[in-house]
Image: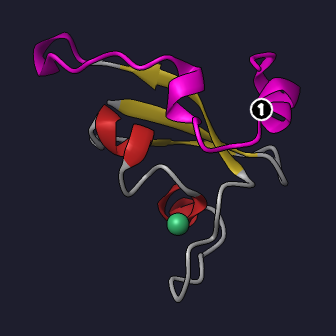
């Protein structure tokens, strides 16, 4: 899956390629630690939490046959108010 990540502090966006959709949903990319890697470097000593980086777009390759998560599901651990403010989803 190709994800477009939004930094809700700077409003910068960037793509992250070739991370499985399930990892965004509930794996290594489900929190700010890895999502922020191309923004500000995270402190890997402890989890950065779910406060800053949202997936705002998900593009799937037909051939990958991945389950297509909704944007809401890809940000499941983030505050609904944050998601709502930046995507209109709640
Ligand atoms: Zn984390």
**Region in magenta:** 61-90
Q: Report which quarter residue 26 is drawn in.
A: top left
Q: Which residue is mark 1?
A: 80
Q: Report which quarter residue 9 is drawn in.
A: bottom right
At 51% from the left edge and 83% from the top edge, which residue is drawn?
Answer: 44
Describe residue 62's horizontal placement relative to residue 15 as left or right: left
- Residue 14 is a magenta residue: no
Q: Looking at the image, which is closer to me, 72 or 60?
A: 72
Q: Residues within 10 Å of mark 1 (few under 14, many from 20)?
A: some
Q: Report which quarter residue 36 is drawn in.
A: bottom right
Q: Find residue 79 and report its horizontal and vertical position in percent.
A: 76, 41
Q: Looking at the image, which is closer to me, 77 or 9?
A: 77
At 63% from the left edge and 70% from the top edge, which residue is drawn?
Answer: 48
Q: Find residue 67 and report its horizontal and vertical position in percent.
A: 27, 18
Residue 57 in the image: above or below residue 8: above
* Secondary element type, mark 1: helix
At 75% from the left edge and 17% from the top edge, which residue is drawn?
Answer: 89
Q: Find residue 58 and report its horizontal and vertical position in percent.
A: 46, 23
């Amino acid at each position: 899956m190709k994800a477009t990540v939004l930094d809700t502090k700077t409003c910068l966006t960037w793509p992250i390629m070739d991370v499985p959709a399930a990892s965004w949903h509930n794996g290594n990319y489900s929190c700010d630690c890895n999502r922020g890697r191309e923004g500000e470097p995270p402190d890997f000593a402890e989890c950065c939490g779910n406060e800053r980086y949202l997936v705002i777009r998900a593009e799937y390759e037909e051939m990958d046959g991945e389950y297509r998560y909704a944007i809401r599901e890809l940000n499941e651990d983030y505050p609904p108010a944050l998601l709502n403010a930046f995507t209109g989803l709640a």
